[in-house]
Image (cartoon, rainbow, N blue to C red):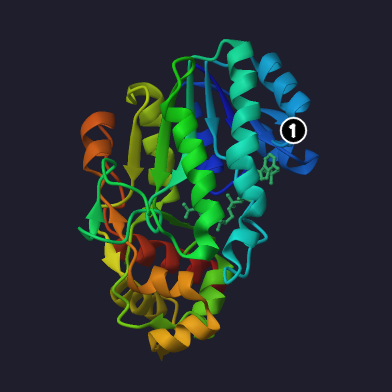
């Protein structure tokens, strides 16, 4: 099939383009810069240089590509270092999830696209009461900490837009927290923060997180292209949701750091903010049962424990070379 990947150079865009091409699809991938267009060519896809917030340019790129499917992987998080001001850090990503979605959808309709798949998130977005591990049928947080409000609204906007579509058919993939070589939880910035003990364990660390290796996220996305059901949302996460009190010390050990500093919730609230205390102590994780069942997908890295270790040992080997 002919597939338009918006955001082909990102954490999941890169392995996704490779996986789509390996599965026999023909891919047009977007970037904003000529330098990264070369990377897209080297991956075997056709580059389109376009800004997702430029409606006429997006329209022209989609119409010229004549895709059957659009996959939206655009976020603007590469420069984010400080999540204390979360909504500010996510401002452009939130625009991409609202305006950017509208622009792509309008272009998709004009180009006669059949299916539109978009990136969402699985984790802190769920309601913080009830079961520790949530399914797609569970509600999102109705009263999130103030600092997360606009980001959650943008996510809900995107999800509502996609799941209410008749043409093209929409599918939402809620990816867990990414990790992979030099990305997400195993990015240089995160490893550096953990080594400097700048990621404290707040309160009891009872907040639960879901992780996903970026290669598994890419494989699930290919499965959604081929087997996803119209109008559905899928949690794309590994098999082992984990409390912060388990994964953060384990990550510290893996990257050769001393155990994280422990901070009481009241102090965390003062220095980090209510939202980061909530992420450490209250948030819920997601179940991948629906994605396994309906997409016929299973993660090659079923547990972050082995996944983190595999990626961290690669990073150490690279560092030593
Ligand atoms: N679920 C998760 O945990 C999650 C989700 C997303 C990101 N992250 C993490 O956040 C960090 C940064 O993510 P990333 O490496 O994917 O980079 P990113 O800066 O978020 O970019 C992702 C993709 O979106 C494109 N993009 C950004 N702004 C755009 C715009 N205005 N118009 C069109 N395209 C635009 C980028 O293209 P160009 O830059 O080539 O133009 C790139 O292909 C990574 O550590 C990643 O793991 C985590």
Residue 47 as seen in the image, left or right of residue 247: right
- Mark 1, Cα crowd under 10 Å, few <14 / some 14-19 / many 20+, is many
Vertical placement of residue 163 versus 244, above or below: above
Query: In the picture, which quadrant includes the C terminus?
Result: bottom right
Q: Position of residue 90 (x, y in %)?
A: 61, 56
Residue at image position (46%, 88%) is 267
Residue at image position (49%, 30%) is 161
Residue 254: image quadrant is bottom left
Residue on which the image places disc 1: 50
Secondary structure under the numbered disc 1 in the rendered image: loop
Residue at image position (27%, 46%) is 138
Vertical placement of residue 215 versus 195, above or below: above
Residue 274 as seen in the image, left or right of residue 248: right
Q: Residue furthest front?
A: 143
Q: Position of residue 36 (x, y in %)?
A: 72, 42
Residue 279: image quadrant is bottom left
- Find out if the beta carbon at label 1 lies less than 8 Å from the nearest ligand 1 atom: yes
Q: Nearer the viewer, residue 268 or 58?
A: 268
Q: Position of residue 258 (x, y in %)?
A: 42, 89
Residue at image position (21%, 42%) is 289
Q: Nearer the viewer, residue 292 or 34?
A: 292
Q: How many marks?
A: 1
Q: Is residue 260 visible?
A: no
Vertical placement of residue 125 versus 204, above or below: above
Q: Is residue 226 visible?
A: yes
Residue 32 as seen in the image, left or right of residue 247: right
Residue 318 as seen in the image, left or right of residue 23: right
Residue 206: image quadrant is bottom left
Q: Position of residue 82 (x, y in %)?
A: 62, 70
Q: Nearer the viewer, residue 130 or 185?
A: 130
């Amino acid at each position: 099939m002919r597939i338009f990947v918006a955001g082909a150079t990102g954490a999941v865009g890169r392995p996704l383009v490779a996986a789509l091409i390996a599965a026999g699809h023909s891919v047009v991938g977007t970037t904003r810069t000529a330098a990264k267009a070369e990377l897209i060519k080297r991956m075997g896809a056709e580059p389109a240089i376009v800004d997702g917030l430029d409606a006429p340019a997006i329209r022209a790129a989609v119409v010229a590509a004549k895709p059957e499917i659009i996959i939206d992987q655009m976020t603007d998080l590469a420069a984010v270092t400080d999540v204390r001001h979360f909504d500010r850090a996510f401002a452009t990503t939130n625009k991409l999830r609202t305006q950017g979605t509208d622009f792509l959808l309008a272009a998709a309709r004009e180009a006669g696209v059949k299916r539109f798949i978009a990136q969402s998130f699985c984790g802190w977005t769920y309601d913080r009461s009830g079961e520790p591990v949530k399914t797609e049928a569970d509600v999102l947080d109705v009263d999130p900490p103030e600092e997360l409000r606009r980001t959650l609204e943008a996510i809900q906007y995107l999800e509502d837009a996609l799941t209410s579509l008749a043409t093209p058919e929409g599918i939402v993939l809620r990816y867990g927290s990414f990790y992979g070589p030099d990305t997400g939880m195993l990015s240089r910035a995160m490893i550096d923060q953990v080594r400097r003990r700048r990621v404290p364990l707040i309160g009891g660390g009872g907040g639960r997180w879901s992780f996903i290796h970026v290669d598994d996220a890419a494989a699930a996305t290919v499965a959604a292209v081929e087997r996803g059901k119209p109008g559905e949302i899928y949690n794309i996460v590994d098999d082992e949701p984990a409390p912060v009190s388990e994964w953060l010390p384990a990550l510290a050990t893996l990257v050769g750091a001393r155990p994280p500093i422990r901070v009481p919730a009241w102090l965390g609230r003062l220095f980090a903010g209510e939202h980061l205390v909530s992420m450490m102590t209250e948030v819920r994780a997601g179940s991948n049962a629906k994605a396994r069942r309906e997409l016929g997908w299973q993660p090659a890295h079923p547990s972050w424990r082995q996944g983190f270790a595999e990626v961290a040992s690669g990073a150490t080997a690279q560092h030593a070379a």
